[in-house]
Each structure stands twice: as C-alpha cells, then as structure tokens.
Image (spheres, rainbow, N blue to C red):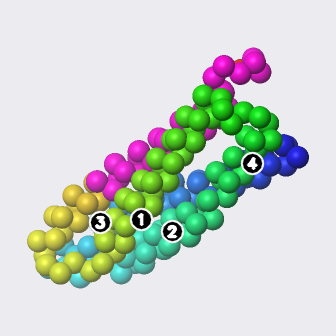
C-alpha cells in the first residue's frame, strides 16, 4: 500500500506542481506585454496568454491538494509523520500553498484587470516584478521540499 500511495503522491506532485511553477513563472512576462504603453493598444495575444496561464495556475492549485493528501497518507503508512525532515517538508509545503493562494493567484487576478490610467503601467511593471519574486520563492520552497523528500536527513537509506 505504501508503494501505491507514494507513487500517487509523486505523480500528483509532478503533474500539478510542475505546471503551476512554469505557468506562474511565465505569467509576469505576458502580463507586462499585455499592458498598454505610451498610448499604444494592449497586446491582445499576450493578454490571452496571461489569462490562460492564470487559469492553469488556479486549476492546478485545486487539483494540487492531492499532493499533501497523498503525502500525509504515505507518511502515515511508513510511520514517519514525526520525523523532522517530514515536519519541515509539511511546513514548507504549507508556506508554498499560502504564497500561491494568498499572494500569487490574487496578484495575477489583479494584473489581468484592465488598467484604468496610463500611470498604472508603472504600477503594473512593479507588480510584475513583485510577482516574479513571489513565484521564485514558491518555486524555491518546492525545490527544497523535493530535496528533503529525496535526501531525508537522518534516514538510514545511505543516501
């Protein structure tokens, strides 16, 4: 049973977190391109791509709940729920989920709204830079969790 749970956990992580990481990383670029600058018309293609990337992030975030669910089930099956490496992984996962749900997704939604004034293009650029930083933090947290899952500090697997 542990092998099945671990397999579903890893597959879910690859198929849900990976697309979020890529789509969230690309979003600021297309949101900036979509903004009208210097009286020019907004780039409709870039706006469409940005909207699609936001839908990908939002949709995969919902499905991504399977990752910690199957991770906890796997940890319970293996009897490692109290191991420090897993507790740190759970904490980092919660922080990453919080960044995604409370910062990245709402920020993307705000950036998709049409600007009301030309002066907002500067705010959009600053917002895109901030969003890039948040996305980088999200991706870094997941990279750390992956390393913790592989190395499992203190384990006797010889890794």
Q: Is residue 150 magenta?
A: yes
User: In the image shown, does 91 or 15 lie closer to the viewer?
Assistant: 91
Q: What secondary structure is marked by label 1?
A: helix
> Mark 1 = which residue?
105
In x, y percent, where is residue 124? 23, 66
Residue 69's place in the image compared with 63, above or below, is above
> Mark 2 = which residue?
58
3D distance between C-alphas at marks 4 and 3: 41 Å
Q: Does the residue at mark 4 contact the one at mark 1 (Cβ under 8 Å)?
A: no
Residue 2's place in the image compared with 35, above or below, is above
Nearer to us: label 2 or label 4: 4
Residue at the limit of the structure toward the left, as seen here: 119
Which is nearer the N-term, disc 2 or disc 1?
Answer: 2
Residue count near mark 2 (Cα–Cα under 10 Å), binned few <14, some 14–19, many ≥20: many
Query: Horizontally, is 35 left or right of 20 in the view?
Result: left
> Mark 4 = which residue?
73
Q: What secondary structure is marked by label 2?
A: helix
Residue count near mark 1 (Cα–Cα under 10 Å), binned few <14, some 14–19, many ≥20: some
User: In the image shown, does 158 or 30 lie closer to the viewer?
Assistant: 158
Which is nearer the N-term, disc 1 or disc 3?
Answer: 3
In x, y percent, where is residue 157? 77, 21
The mark found on residue 49 in the picture is none
Q: Does the residue at mark 3 contact the one at mark 2 (Cβ under 8 Å)?
A: no
> Mark 3 = which residue?
32
Q: What secondary structure is marked by label 3?
A: helix
3D distance between C-alphas at marks 1 and 3: 16 Å
* Stretch in magenta: 130-158
């Amino acid at each position: 049973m542990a092998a099945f749970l671990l397999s579903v956990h890893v597959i879910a992580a690859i198929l849900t977190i990976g697309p979020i990481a890529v789509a969230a990383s690309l979003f600021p670029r297309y949101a900036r391109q979509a903004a009208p600058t210097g009286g020019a018309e907004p780039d409709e293609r870039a706006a469409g791509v940005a909207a699609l990337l936001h839908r990908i992030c939002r949709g995969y975030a919902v499905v991504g709940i399977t990752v910690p669910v199957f991770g906890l089930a796997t940890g319970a099956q293996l009897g490692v729920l109290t191991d420090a490496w897993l507790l740190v992984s759970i904490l980092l996962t919660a922080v990453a989920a919080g960044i995604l749900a409370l910062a990245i997704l709402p920020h993307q939604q705000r950036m998709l709204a049409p600007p009301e004034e030309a002066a907002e293009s500067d705010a959009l650029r600053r917002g895109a830079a901030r969003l890039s930083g948040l996305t980088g933090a999200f991706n870094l947290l997941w990279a750390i969790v992956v390393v913790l899952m592989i190395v499992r500090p203190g384990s006797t697997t010889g890794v």
